[in-house]
Structures are given as structure tokens and as C-alpha cells.
């Protein structure tokens, strides 16, 4: 059975470790590696898009980083329970015309007993910014 440490039940410390691992993985921009942190049948809501399972996660992330160039993400702990973690995040990216954006949002995560994420619900807002306003 696959395990992705730390595993539930989470403490504040292990929840923060899980968040940092997710941030590092997403900043790698490696969809295949990232997908391994999710269950085979993981359910996502990302903005208005619904993604189910690792194959769709990989496809979604490949498309994301074709559009969102020079992507950089920062996740921050919000709260946790035994097998759930809530995070706030911001990330910056530019489109192919050179316009920069900062995306803000919240994610709610639910994990199985092996530490794989089985549900990810993300609410995200994009804000156009100037290059001089970048923070990440």
C-alpha cells in the first residue's frame, strides 16, 4: 500500500510538514510527481473545474503550466483536524503576453489513512499585477 508521510492523524507540526511538501512539489511543476501524492480516485474542484483521478490531475497540471508561465507558489497553514488540512495560498505567474498575475485562495484537503490526498477543493481569485508588484 502506498504511503505518503506524514500520515493522519495530523498534529499542527505534521500538518505544516504536509503543506510544505505540497508547496515544494507544486513548485517543481512536475505533474507526474505531484499526482503521486493523491489517491488513484482523488476528487478535485479547482475554480469551476472538476478533476478526478491521477490521469486527469496530470493532464490538468500540464495544461496549467502551459498557460501559467514562471509559476511560483507559497502555501500557509490555516487549520487542521485529524485527517483534514486547510491552507491559504498565493502564487504568481505570467501569461505569454507578459502580463503578471497573483492568485489568492484557500484549499481544503482530506487525506486517507495512508496520507494520500483524496479530496482537494480550491477557491481561487486572480489579480493582474505589474512586474514591479511581484513578491514571490
Image (spheres, helix red, strand yellow):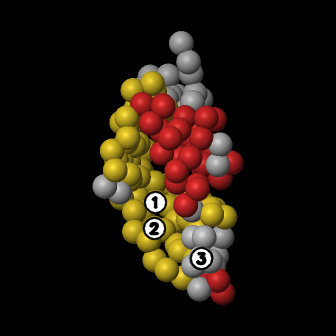
42, above or below 124, in the image: above
Q: Secondary structure at mark 2?
A: strand
Q: Is residue 84 left or right of residue 63?
A: left
Quickly name the residue at label 1.
88
Quickly name the residue at label 2.
104
The residue sitting at 56% across, 46% down in the picture is 62
In this orientation, does residue 111 appear?
Answer: no
Farthest residue in the front direction? 97
First in residue order: circle 1 vs circle 3: 1
- Label 2 vs label 1: CA separation? 8 Å
- Label 2 vs label 3: CA separation? 21 Å
The residue sitting at 57% across, 30% down in the picture is 36
Q: Secondary structure at mark 3?
A: loop
Quadrant for the C terminus in the image = bottom right
The disc placed on residue 17 is none
Quickly name the residue at label 3.
97
Tell whether label 1 touches label 2 (CB within 8 Å): yes
Number of the front mark, 2 or 3:
3
Q: Position of residue 127 (x, y in %)?
A: 46, 77
Q: Position of residue 86 (x, y in %)?
A: 41, 50
Tell whether label 3 touches label 1 (CB within 8 Å): no
First in residue order: circle 2 vs circle 3: 3
Q: Choose between 60 and 11: the one closer to the eye.
A: 60
In this orientation, does residue 86 appear?
Answer: yes
The residue sitting at 48% across, 68% down in the picture is 103
Amino acid at each position: 500500500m502506498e504511503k505518503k508521510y506524514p500520515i493522519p492523524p495530523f498534529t499542527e507540526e505534521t500538518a505544516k510538514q504536509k503543506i510544505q511538501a505540497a508547496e515544494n512539489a507544486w513548485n517543481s511543476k512536475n505533474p507526474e510527481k505531484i499526482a503521486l501524492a493523491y489517491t488513484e480516485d482523488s476528487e478535485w474542484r479547482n475554480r469551476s473545474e472538476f478533476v478526478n483521478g491521477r490521469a486527469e490531475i496530470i493532464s490538468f497540471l500540464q495544461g496549467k503550466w502551459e498557460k501559467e508561465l514562471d509559476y511560483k507558489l507559497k502555501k500557509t497553514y490555516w487549520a487542521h483536524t485529524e485527517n483534514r488540512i486547510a491552507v491559504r495560498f498565493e502564487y504568481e505567474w505570467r501569461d505569454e503576453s507578459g502580463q503578471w498575475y497573483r492568485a489568492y485562495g484557500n484549499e481544503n484537503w482530506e487525506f486517507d489513512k495512508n496520507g494520500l490526498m483524496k479530496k482537494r477543493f480550491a477557491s481561487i481569485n486572480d489579480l493582474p499585477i505589474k512586474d514591479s508588484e511581484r513578491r514571490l
